[in-house]
Image (cartoon, rainbow, N blue to C red):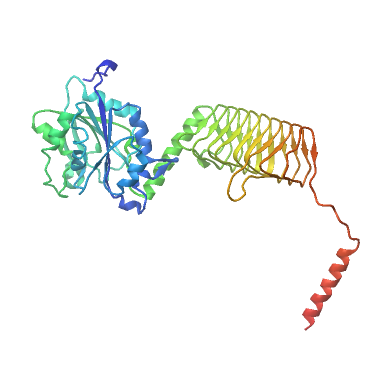
């Protein structure tokens, strides 16, 4: 009954995203759909899928905390205000003015249902243009527990009735096919049907699902497309947010392993939405990836590392207990060891910082070695400054490099030095106070203090 649209016949597409709810169950000052999953607001996940379809128009229905959505969308979609909020049908009606000159297809989506795949959206649009020309395409699913979901009563893929749970009979509630709320319709059909929706129901609201019943009563027909329950899971509370984060992470871990990475304890590794992992990467337990991480092939990330905004090239080793912050670049076979923190640090090929080091605003040349306890002093309380360390340079343990400063190629900075001036290629820089020895001083000190302690105890 369906034909896949060819590229030349695809009509323009508009996406209407409902995000006007108050999200009271979140108990948050942040709009519900801006709460992140894997480092990206749930609305951002949905918009990324929508954008794969190259829509001509995007309209987001806003209400509570509209200014937050306006800031987050930054002009990437039109906004339409729903006030007061009188149900899902009323919400979609608010997009009519924004689409007054639009004559293509309309996808109706929900900002708190973030993981609808682009392919599922395409299937809905393809079905809308099937040979039987349905008036509305409904996206449905079969959950393990139908709970309070509205039901889709269907004969094959023909929808005979849509009913909200609170208005359903016992027989209708026994049906497992549930309404996700997502629909597709041609713009002219959609708004003509919405104009006829009433609010004679238990909640006194204008239900979007009623457009299906109205179309059926007109002698037209509507159809259902099904999808995985994960794809249409809504998020209304912090607990549901955590469940969906966990489900997303589980799928992402499986993908990483299928693509050739080894996760020693998969359940302890956390990815961001944009994490890129190469082949033959080994990730030990308790590793967290923030946004903006790229990991090349044959990298080993040892246990208990936190990595964000970093590029790690082929053959590098990181950790254990390392923190790589935004702007870090590790070139081929560079090594960051335990309790090392980097920020805006670029380590050349084979460069090493193995222990207890902070490298901020630093460029480290190829094969340079940074000793334990070294810090780049990059901030004076007002501005940040850069440290440049040349190729094959050796920085002794417990050194402080006070930026801006340059250490030349093959130079050596002796352990315990506080370097405030540039060091030329091949030079040794030793900056220490003169060692002073006072024979017997410690013995005399201890004797005196023991006497004082005994006198105090005797009183």
Q: Position of residue 257 (x, y in %)?
A: 51, 30
Comparing 142 with 89, the one in front is 89
x 27%, y 15%: residue: 8
Q: In the orientation shown, which residue stands out farthest toward the right?
A: 439
Residue 328 falls in image quadrant: top right
Work out whether residue 117 can be spotted: no
The image quadrant of residue 111 is top left
In the rendered image, residue 367, in percent from the top left (x then y), is placed at 71, 31
- Residue furthest to the left in view is 218
**Left or right position of 106 against 456:** left
Closest to the observer: 236 or 389?
389
Q: Is residue 230 left or right of residue 360?
A: left
In x, y percent, where is residue 300? 61, 33
- The answer, for residue 273, to whether it is visible in the render is yes
Residue 45, by quadrant, is top left
Q: Quadrant of the C terminus?
A: bottom right
Instruction: Decide: is 77 above or below 437.
Output: above
Q: In what quadrant of the picture does the N terminus appear? A: top left
Asked if residue 38 lies left or right of residue 331, the reply is: left
The residue at the point 30 percent across, 39 percent down is 143
């Amino acid at each position: 009954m369906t034909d896949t649209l060819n590229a030349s016949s695809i009509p323009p597409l508009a996406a209407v995203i409902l995000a006007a709810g108050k999200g009271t169950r979140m108990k948050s000052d942040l709009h519900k759909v801006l709460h992140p999953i894997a480092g990206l607001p749930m609305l951002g996940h949905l918009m990324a899928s929508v954008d794969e379809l190259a829509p001509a128009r995007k309209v987001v229905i806003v209400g509570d905390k509209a200014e937050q959505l306006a800031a987050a969308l930054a002009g990437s979609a039109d906004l339409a205000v729903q006030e007061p909020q009188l149900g899902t049908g009323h919400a979609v009606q608010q997009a009519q003015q924004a689409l007054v000159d639009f004559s293509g297809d309309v996808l109706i989506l929900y900002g708190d249902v973030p993981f609808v795949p682009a392919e599922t959206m395409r299937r809905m649009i393809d079905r809308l243009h099937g040979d039987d020309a349905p008036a509305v395409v409904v996206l449905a699913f079969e959950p393990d527990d139908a709970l309070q979901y509205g039901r889709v009563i269907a004969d094959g893929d023909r929808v005979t009735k849509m009913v909200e749970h609170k208005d359903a009979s016992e027989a209708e509630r026994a049906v497992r096919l549930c309404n996700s709320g997502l629909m597709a319709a041609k713009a002219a059909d959609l708004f003509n049907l919405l104009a006829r929706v009433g609010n004679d129901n238990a909640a006194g609201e204008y239900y979007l699902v009623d457009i299906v019943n109205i179309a059926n009563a007109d002698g037209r027909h509507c159809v259902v497309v099904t999808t995985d329950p994960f794809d249409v899971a809504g998020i209304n509370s912090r607990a549901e947010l955590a469940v969906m984060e966990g489900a997303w992470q589980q799928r992402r871990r499986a993908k990483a392993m299928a693509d050739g990475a080894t996760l020693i304890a998969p359940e302890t590794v956390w990815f961001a939405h944009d994490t890129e992992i190469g082949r033959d990467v080994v990730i030990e337990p308790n590793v967290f990836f923030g946004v903006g991480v790229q990991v090349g092939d044959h990298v080993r990330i040892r246990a208990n590392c936190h990595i964000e905004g970093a590029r790690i090239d082929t053959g590098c080793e990181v950790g254990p207990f390392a923190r790589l912050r935004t702007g870090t670049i590790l070139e081929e076979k560079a090594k960051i060891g335990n309790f090392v923190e980097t920020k805006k640090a670029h380590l050349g090929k084979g460069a090493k910082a193995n222990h207890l080091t902070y490298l901020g605003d630093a460029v480290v040349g190829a094969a340079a070695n940074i000793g334990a306890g070294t810090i780049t002093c990059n901030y004076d309380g007002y501005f940040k400054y850069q440290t440049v360390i040349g190729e094959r340079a050796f920085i002794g343990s417990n050194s402080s490099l006070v930026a801006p400063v340059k250490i030349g190629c093959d130079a050596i900075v002796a352990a315990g030095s506080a370097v405030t001036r540039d060091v030329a290629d091949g030079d040794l820089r030793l900056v220490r106070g003169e060692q002073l020895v006072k024979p017997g001083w410690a013995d005399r000190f201890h004797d005196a203090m023991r006497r004082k302690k005994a006198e105090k105890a005797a009183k």
